[in-house]
Every structure is written in C-alpha cells, then in structure tokens.
Amino acid sequence: MSSANQGIQRLLEAESQASEVVAQAKKDKVLRLKQAKEEAENEIMAYRSLREEQFQKYGSQRLGDSGDYAKKIQSETDAAMRNIQISMDANKEKIITSLLQSVTTVSI
C-alpha cells in the first residue's frame, strides 16, 4: 500500500509542479505580449512623428510660409477694394442720374 501511496503522492506532486509551470508560462506570455505591445506603440509613435516631420517639411517647401501668402492675398484684396471704391466714386453721379431717369421716365 505504501508504494501505491508513494506513487499517488508523486503523481500529485508532478501535477502540482506541472500546474505551476503552466501558470508561470501564462504569466511569461502575458508579460511578453505587454512588452511587444509597448514596443509596437513606441515604433508607431516614432514612425508617426517622422512622417509628420516629413509632411511639415514638404508643406513648407511647396506652399511657403502661409503668413506671407496671407499677407499677399490681403494686400491684393485691399488694392482691388481701393480700385472698386475709386471707380464707384468716379461713376456715382452718372449711375444715380441714369437710375433716376429710368425710374421717372414713363413710356406710353
């Protein structure tokens, strides 16, 4: 009987050790997965910042400084508005006279 008990005891110990090994393997797997995830996130962040830097450089080379462009557009707009105002001031009386004549003239 004692040899049967010893055999059972050895089997129980082996089962316990096996479950400990499996539990440790699961912990190691989870740890490796976390590390792999962190490494992947770091690589993604590095790649994203590299691409963003390249995009900004490309944009500044192709479009120039947007502040200069905005100033140029504003000065062109101001010049066009001045020209319209000058034209309006010059033709104001003619247009008012023409409109009044058109409104007050009744053809029968």
Image (spheres, grey):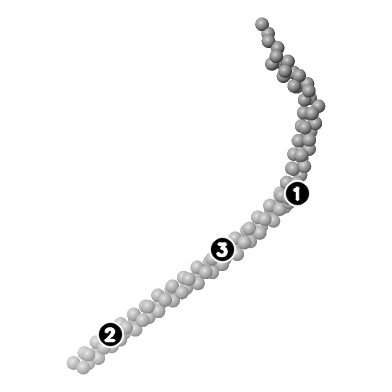
Distance between the alpha carbons at the discs numbered 1 and 2: 81 Å
User: What amino acid type is highlighted by mark number 3?
Assistant: Ile
Q: Position of residue 92 (x, y in %)?
A: 77, 25
**Residue at figure coordinates x 21%, y 93% from the top left:** 2
* Above or below, 9 relative to 50: below
Residue in view at x 77 percent, y 42 percent = 75
Nearest the viewer among 101 and 58 is 101
The residue at which mark 1 appears reads as: 68
Task: Say few, some or many: other residues with alpha carbon within 10 Å of mark 3 (under 14 / 14 to 19 / 20 or more).
Answer: few
Check disc 2 and report the residue beneath it.
12
Q: Is residue 19 left or right of residue 47?
A: left
Question: Which numbered disc covers residue 33?
Answer: none
Quadrant of the rendered structure where residue 22 is? bottom left
What count of labels does the image hold? 3
Q: Amino acid at mark 1?
A: Asp
Where does residue 54 sit, x and y in percent of width and height? 66, 57
2 or 3: tag closer to the N-terminus = 2
Residue where numbered disc 3 is placed? 44
Label 3 vs label 1, nearer the camera: 1
Q: Secondary structure at mark 1?
A: helix
- Of badges 2 and 3, nearer the viewer stands 3
